[in-house]
Amino acid sequence: MATKSRIKAKGKKRSTMVTPKAEATPRTEGPKPARSRRSRAGTAEAPARPAKHSALEAAVRLLGETGQAMNCQEMIAAMVAKGYWTSPGGKTPSATLYTSILKELTTKGAESRFVKVDRGRFALRNARA
């Protein structure tokens, strides 16, 4: 099926005239233009803040201190109580922690920091409870 533009173009001949291409302008040597990214050069002046731990790092710290297996809800409650970690406002931080631990277990295998002791309960690999 022909479209309107094809119908109009059928009766017309194509132009064989070649237009000259614009010549490329040579690059001038000199400094490159500055990028618009923020540089980290000024960060040395800022006061040092304590590093925030991720939920996984806080779980490793907590399990190392307690030495016993815990489920994720218990870990989240203990991490918040001890001040190791605070939720950024998520609705289900225990589910997020559970998923993160399982992902580490599947991707790292025997090199994982965690070991699954029972259904939903995890401990540190070197400190089995």
Image: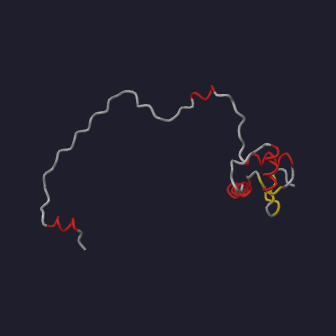
Would you identify the image quadrant in which residue 26 lies? Answer: top left
Q: Residue at x 63, y 25 (%)?
A: 45
Could you tell me residue 32's position as x and y percent? 41, 31
Is residue 116 positioned above or below 50 on the image?
below
- Relative vertical location of residue 19 with respect to residue 98 in this rendering, above or below: above
The image position of residue 30, as x and y in percent, is 37, 27
Q: Residue at x 44, y 31 (%)?
A: 34
Front-most of residues 40 and 30:
40
Residue at the farthest top position: 45
Quadrant where the C terminus is found in the figure: bottom right
- Answer left or right for 119 relative to 35: right
From the viewer's side, name the closer residue of 116 and 41: 41
Q: How many marks?
A: 0
Quarter-of-image position of residue 82: top right
Percent x, y for residue 1? 25, 74
Q: Farthest residue in the bottom direction?
A: 1
Residue 68 lies, with reference to residue 33, above or below; the image says below
Q: Locate residue 56, reporting x and y percent.
A: 73, 49
* The one of 122 and 4 positioned closer to us in this rendering: 4
Tell me which corner region of the image, top left, top right, bottom left or bottom right, holds residue 84: top right
Front residue of this view, candidates 43 and 105: 43
Scheme by which the image is coloured: secondary structure
